[in-house]
Image (cartoon, rainbow, N blue to C red):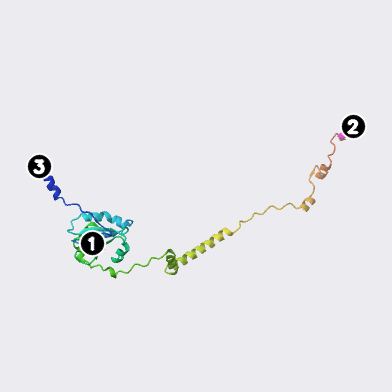
Amino acid sequence: MHGTILLVAVAVLATPAVAAVFNLDDGNFDTDLRGAGGSFVKFYAPWCSHCKKLAPVWHELSERDLGNVRVCHLDLTRVSTASTIKERFAIRAFPTLLYFPPASEAIYKYSGKRELEALTTYAKGGWKETDAFDPSKEPPLPPRQSFTEQLWSLVTGKGRWLFGFMGISIAIGIGVLLCSTGKAPARQALPKPPDAAAAASSPDRTFGNVPLSQQQRGTPSRSFDNVPLSQQRAKAD
C-alpha cells in the first residue's frame, strides 16, 4: 500500500507542470515584462480574427519547454495605457509579437509564420539571428479623420477619378431611363362619326320598290284578290 502511494507521488512530481500564458495588465506590465529568461509577448485585441486563430497555438507554445522564457499576452482593449503602449512599441496591427530578452533594453519583433514549431524555434534562441527592432524608426500613425474629412479626401485625392466615373455613369443611366419612359404610347385612331350630310343624301332603303320612308309614314291596306281589306270589312258589315 505504501509502495503504491510512493510510486504515485513520484509520478506526479516527475510530471512537468502545465504552463499557462502569463497575462500582462496595467499593474504588472513594466515589472514583469522582462522575466529571468525573457518574455515572448503577444499584443492582441479580442475582436481580431487573426488573434483568435493564433490563440490556441499561443497556448500550446506556453506548454512547450522553452527554458526560462515566459509566454505572455496583453489585451490592449482592457488597459488604460493602451495608446501609450502602442506608441511606445510601434504597434500598428494585431497581433504583434515581440520578444524581450532578459537584462537588456533590446526588442525583437517576430515576423515569421504563426505556427507552433516556428514560434518555438524563435523563442528558444532564434530571435538572436534577427535584427533588433527599433520602434522609434517606425512611421507614426496617421491622425484619425472624421467621416467628412475622409469623404473629402476621397473626392479631392486619388478617389476623384472614381467619383467622376460614377457620376458620369449615373447621369447616363438617368438619361437612358428618361428617354425610355418619356415616350407617349401611340394612340389608336378613333372611328370617324358618320357624316350627317352623307346620311341625308343616301337613297332610301326599299322593300318591294316602296321607299322605307313611305312605309314608315303609312302602311298600305292588305287586300285579297285585289280588293282592299277595308272595303272587304265594309261589305261584310
Q: Quadrant of the C terminus?
A: top right
Badges 2 and 1: C-beta atoms under 8 Å apart?
Answer: no
**Residue at far front of view:** 27
Report the residue marked by disc 1. Answer: 31
54 or 68, which lies in front?
Answer: 68
Q: Nearer the viewer, mark 2 or mark 1?
A: 1
**Residue at far top of view:** 237
Q: Is residue 177 magenta?
A: no
Label 3 crowd (10 A; few <14 / some 14-19 / many >=20) = few
Report the residue marked by disc 3. Answer: 2
182 or 63, which lies in front?
Answer: 63
Examine the rendered structure and indicate whether residue 204 appears above or below residue 124: above
Examine the rendered structure and indicate whether residue 208 appears above or below residue 138: above
Report the residue marked by disc 2. Answer: 234
User: Mark 1 is on which residue type?
Assistant: Thr
Compute the Cα span from label 2 to label 1: 149 Å
User: Mark 2 is on which residue type?
Assistant: Ala
Compute the Cα span from label 3 to label 1: 45 Å
Q: Nearer the viewer, mark 2 or mark 3?
A: 3
Q: Does label 2 or label 1 sit earlier along the sequence?
A: 1
For numbered disc 1, what is the local secondary structure?
helix
For numbered disc 2, what is the local secondary structure?
helix
Label 1 crowd (10 A; few <14 / some 14-19 / many >=20) = few
Quadrant in the rendering for residue 187? bottom right
**Residue at far left of view:** 3
